[in-house]
Image (cartoon, rainbow, N blue to C red):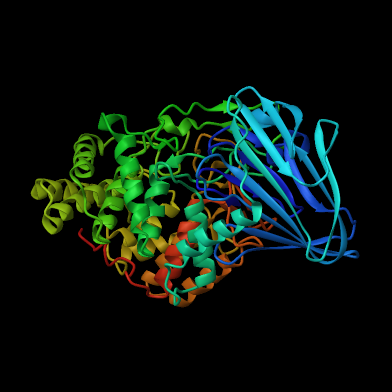
Amino acid sequence: MVGDLHTAALVGADGSVDWLCLPRFDSDAAFAALLGDEENGSWRLAPTAADAVARRSYRGDSLVLDTEWTCGEGRIRVTDLMPPREQQPRLVRIVEGLDGDVAVRGTLRVRLGYGRVVPWVTREPGGLRAVAGPDALWLTTAAPLLGADHSTVSDFRVCAGERVAFTLAWAPSTDPAPAVPDPLDELQRTEEFWSGWSGRLPADLPYRAAVVRSLVTLKGLTYRPTGGIVAAATTSLPEDPGGVRNWDYRFCWLRDAALTLGALLRCGYVDEAAAWRDWLVRAVAGDPADVRVLYGVAGERRLPEVELGWLAGYEGARPVRIGNGAADQVQLDVYGEVLDAFHLAREAGLPDDGRAWDVQRALLGHLERHWQDPDQGIWEVRGEPRHFVYSKVMAWVAFDRAAQAVTEHGLPGDADRFRAVRDTIHADVLEHGFDERLDSFVQSYGSSDVDAALLLLPQLGFLPAGDPRIVGTVDRVQRELVVDGLVRRYRVGSTGGSSDGVSGDEGAFLVCSFWLADALALVGRPEQARALFERLLGLTNDVGLLAEEYDPVHRRQLGNTPQAFSHVGLVNTALNLAGHSPQLGSRRRHRG
């Protein structure tokens, strides 16, 4: 992934940009080969030699990607970047000769409207212009350009020390050509931005390379104009190869963003916390009964789910969806995630302004009236609502953190009332959510299934880690949800569990595997925890990125990528295992 804090491009190991939405994460894609084929939009830049082999790496702690190609003719490096945006988005690609004299070909296929619209292309001084409806893309380069079969081909050679640069800029089609800064200046500015951002991290950070890569990825999933944080850069990458579990994750889930915020705060990024807080206050303003599970990057509420029939899907996984029907679900756990995020921000020293606290109190008033209702839960099941135990626990979290806000931070409110509701929820969960026969908490009231989200109970402070009910739940997750050492969210219907309203199966959920490592450490099994964590580190791709899930059978990543949830899990578990301050649970004390 390369990105500019407004959107992101995905670059394949073959040197092809196969995914790029412009001008925002959730805009229509101009390159959609990821969900179809090269004719749905792609831009490949690589040596023509059949024996060319690529090796990729990020440049330092940045989102500048270097792909070094080696072939019989010599070596070149292709550097991809999207400069942090001031005006229009720009994708910059720089080809540099390292050794010998190498023939290179670039093939650009712009397909707007998610791969459906072939633009009208015209020659312009220094490049070309591609226009369709409201969108215009401008390619600027000194390399030769030739039109062929609705694509633009560029054949050239580079010797050691030579550079050939390409800049692809987007602008509204009604605007004049955007200014194109010198690509080498753009490269320097982009490196300086990322080194300045990541350079604030301590040198002794545990598992530093993996943690910093995850933090940079999380920052890259942030929409800078508003502070919103998207769950992933893609849509419809399948959780079940060839199946229908294909969802659009280019939006801001309150839950995912709150957990991302917690990871950033633990590493000292308070500015991101302030920006997210302001985004949240704007997004949820109004009737607390109308709080959505997810929003657009600017706080949009209407995100209708639509299927794109002209795209074949990743390896044939259909349908391809944009928008997300989960936006209309009731998921009560998000109230607790939001209140906990504000709590973590207060503990990190970010003052809670009056507007933010007013919003929290309104949310608490609604939750007090509705915490006993069934919901769709953290995993957004598309079946009948249930009384999910994790949702009830997160309602407990909401009132627990509210009571602390009053008693420990001096915010106005009735702490006794908050504690009373908290204690009522706690008793209800212990009565209906724990199965003594199974010696574990269960996924929902009346169910016998177990859910990986229950691994979070000791981290949240609901019960002490040494409580036999917590230990029994951890043991049961290990027995029933672990496949080849990794953790499923729950057992779906095809693997002996209950229906979640969607056909097919899915892989192991990476964040759940990190949660198991945390839980193992808390219940006194640090060797198991560390072994699992290091196994998870080995699942990242060649540049340190994680998708949502992992297929332990075919040994490949599954789902949308890069996934904020997975990288949040990596950061938190690394800090927890190293005993990095603040300690796990130190700000989520047991209150039950």
Q: Quadrant of the C terminus?
A: bottom left
Q: Vertically, is 278 above or below 271?
A: above
Q: Vertically, is 508 above or below 243?
A: below
Question: Which residue is at a point 39% across and 37% down the rendered structure image?
Answer: 293
Q: In the shown orientation, is residue 24 left or right of residue 360?
A: right
Question: Which residue is at a point 67% across and 36% down the rendered structure image?
Answer: 138
Residue situated in front as seen by the camera: 240 or 337:
337
Q: In the shown orientation, is residue 452 left or right of residue 312?
A: left
Instruction: Name, please, the residue furthest toward the front.
Output: 125
| Residue 66 in sight here | yes
**Measured from the top left, where is residue 48 in percent x and y?**
88, 53
**Measured from the top left, where is residue 301 in percent x and y?**
40, 29
**Measured from the top left, where is residue 249 in percent x and y?**
52, 41
**Measured from the top left, where is residue 327 in percent x and y?**
43, 32
Q: Vertically, is 553 above or below 464?
A: above
Q: Quadrant of residue 95?
A: bottom right
| Residue 441 in sight here | no
Question: Which residue is at a point 55% across and 37% down the rendered structure image?
Answer: 248
